[in-house]
Image (cartoon, grey):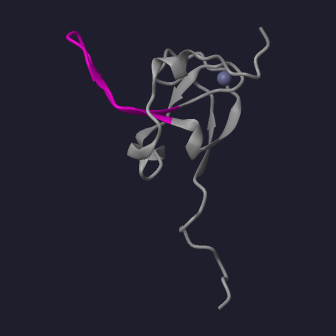
Amino acid sequence: MKILELGRVGEKWTIQHRCTAWGNGYGGCNALLEIEYDDLRFYEGQEFPWRVSKPAVCFKCPCCGKTTDLDINDWPPEYTNLPKWTSEWSATRPSSEAY
Ligand SMILES: [Zn+2]
């Protein structure tokens, strides 16, 4: 059998997105990034006495280190299997950045 066009099975999920720091205070560096599944973190959301923060899927820019939330329409399938967002992950500066 000949594959004329690949189906979605095994297809690598990627998305192109600019670093906007949307949902995280804004002020991203506007770098255009191709994001892979492994670059994403899933934030489960949290309830504080004063507000509720909703679940989010986010990536961290390798240029400026800021976190950008994806629009819910851009979330990958099986996003609940993504590694969990942690404050340590968020606080770690990108390794490419010179101190
Ligand atoms: Zn950036």
* Residue 47 placement, left or right of 78: left
Question: Any magenta on residue 79?
Answer: no
**Residue 27 screen position, x and y as percent:** 59, 15
Instruction: Name the quarter where the C terminus is drawn.
Output: top right
Q: Is residue 56 above or below residue 87?
A: below
Instruction: Name the quarter where the N terminus is drawn.
Output: bottom right
**Residue 98 screen position, x and y as percent:** 79, 13
**Residue 42 screen position, x and y as percent:** 43, 35
User: Residue placed at 72% from the left, 23% from the top?
Assistant: 63
What is the tally of numbered marks visible in this picture? 0
Q: Is residue 39 above or below residue 89?
A: below
> Which sits in the foreground, 21 or 39?
39
> Which sits in the foreground, 26 or 2?
2
* Quadrant in which residue 36 is drawn: top right
* Residue 63 placement, left or right of 22: right
User: Residue placed at 34% from the left, 31% from the top?
Assistant: 44
Q: Ligand 1 lies in which image quarter? A: top right
| Magenta-drawn segment | 41-58
User: Residue placed at 47% from the left, 18% from the top?
Assistant: 87
* Residue 56 placement, left or right of 31: left
User: Residue placed at 70% from the left, 29% from the top?
Assistant: 31
Q: Is residue 86 above or below residue 51?
A: below
* Residue 3 placement, left or right of 25: right
Q: Residue furthest left?
A: 49
